[in-house]
Amino acid sequence: ASCQGGEGGGGAGQMVKLFKILRLFRLVKLLRMVKFARILDRYQDDLFHIMPIIMIMRLLLLLLYVAHTMGCFFNYFSGEEWMTDAERTSVINGVLTSWVDDEELLASPSGAPVGVGARYIACMYWAFTTMTTVGYGDISARTDMERVWAIISMIIGGLMFSGIIATMQETVANMNLSKAAHRHKMNCVAAFMRDRGLAKKFRKPVLRFFRQQQVRAYTDRDLLCELPYHLRRDVLFESFEDFIKASPLFKLVRDAHFPVEVTTRFGVVGIPKGEMVFEKGEYGQTLFCVGSGRVEIVSCREEGNQHKHVLSTGGYFGEGAALGYSLMRTANVVASEGVTLYTLEYEDVAEMFSLFPKFRKVMQKAYPKREEMFTGTWPTIPDEPLTSMAEQHALPHRQESLDVLRQQVVSLQRAEASREAHLEALRQQVQNIQSSLDSLAGGMSTLLSRLPSSAVS
């Protein structure tokens, strides 16, 4: 009866279609996930450590939602009311069988009757094979309406799937940017060695050194300087708490701002066990502080014996060139175990000397005794104070600042000269106007003197 045309049957069919379409609007309820997303955005700072996992779960839920919607509409458009007259006739004659009615296709291995659950699984299966462009073909569109919806699903589902997978890949990649940066650095090192054709005996030490380094995808100093001072101070005290407590510098320079300014400028370098930090006679450019691990300062005494002095967390070395005593290293420094060193370039040391004069006084006072303890020799103090390496680094910056100040003075002088010229021009105009008024007054007086007295009165 349903396959026969007729005015009453057509009206009933239209009502059934309208009723089913209205029922599909219940899918809109699934958009409540948007509210869930807003809640996640609100608490994303509290869920900082698991946010990447939550982001992946959100994308998976979105993928399931898209597949669910596509499968539900595929099942809906497979109904008899969406068939053409020719397709209904083919169904009656047994020529065409919709996948919904194909019990052999949907039957389970256990022989259980085909129910709603089996049809839903089949719809989701079709949706995922369509989105992923796998297309096994066992469940396929057989009517015109099914094919139309399949085309729409291929376009929308394919775009959605590729976008979700790309976003998921980016999320996974961003879970550890520093690890990715380290991997990129190692690839660059490998390319360097291949291009240089380094011998095998050098390749392993070079790779070992770079694998030990802490490569980050960001610059600590840039991020720290963007923070408000009070927040930067709290972050640095939390990060360098053990070092600040152990280092003698922070005990001698009792200034609340000193630890913040020093640790803000720290660089980080890792040295494997047994590797040289620097050698005697090497020109120094860096002050080192021991963050973790231990180093041995090895020197040869006059009697020919080697002397070793161990520095652990909080110790520092390499300050001689910064203070102007010697531009060359006076001892060998070796990592007795894997060590993390905080570094201060000499231009940063010069800046610290300028900001905190007591810092320089403390280091100058302690250096001779430290040098004697490390190397067994008292450092030679020059008759005339040498310009320290740190100050030499600072000189170009100071010269640049002086040049800028000179340019500003010249600009101000030019502006002042321009204002004086403008004022002089204004004075000249005022004098011209005054002369014109005087001439006009003289002319009026002459004219009045020539008029008859009766006319004047």
Image (cartoon, rainbow, N blue to C red):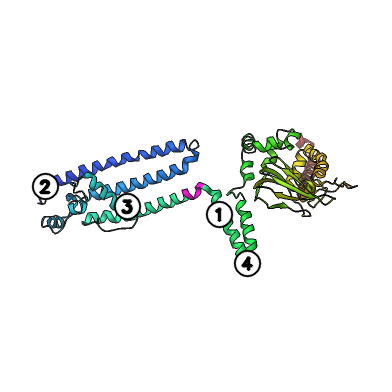
Q: Residues within 10 Å of mark 3 (few under 14, many from 20)?
A: many
Asked whether 192 or 228 is in front, the reply is: 192
| Location of residue 384 in the rendering, given as x and y in whole percent from the top left corner | 89, 47
Amino acid type at circle 2 is Gly
**Closer to the observer: label 2 or label 3?**
3
Tell me the CA gap for discs 4 and 3: 50 Å
Question: x, y (%) of residue 341?
Answer: 67, 46
Secondary structure at badge 3 equals: helix
Label 2 sits on residue: 9
Q: Identity of the amino acid at label 4?
A: Gly
Mark 1 vs 3, N-terminal side: 3
Circle on res. 183: 1
Give x and y (percent) for residue 152. Answer: 30, 54
Assess whether residue 172 is covered by the magenta stretch: yes
| Residue 211, horizontal then vertical, whole percent | 60, 53
Residue underneath mark 3: 128
Residue 197's disc is 4
**Chief SS of the magenta region:** helix
Residue at 26 percent across and 58 percent down: it is 137
Of 117 and 29, the residue lying toward us: 117
Labels 2, 1: front one:
1
Q: Is residue 118 left or right of residue 402?
A: left
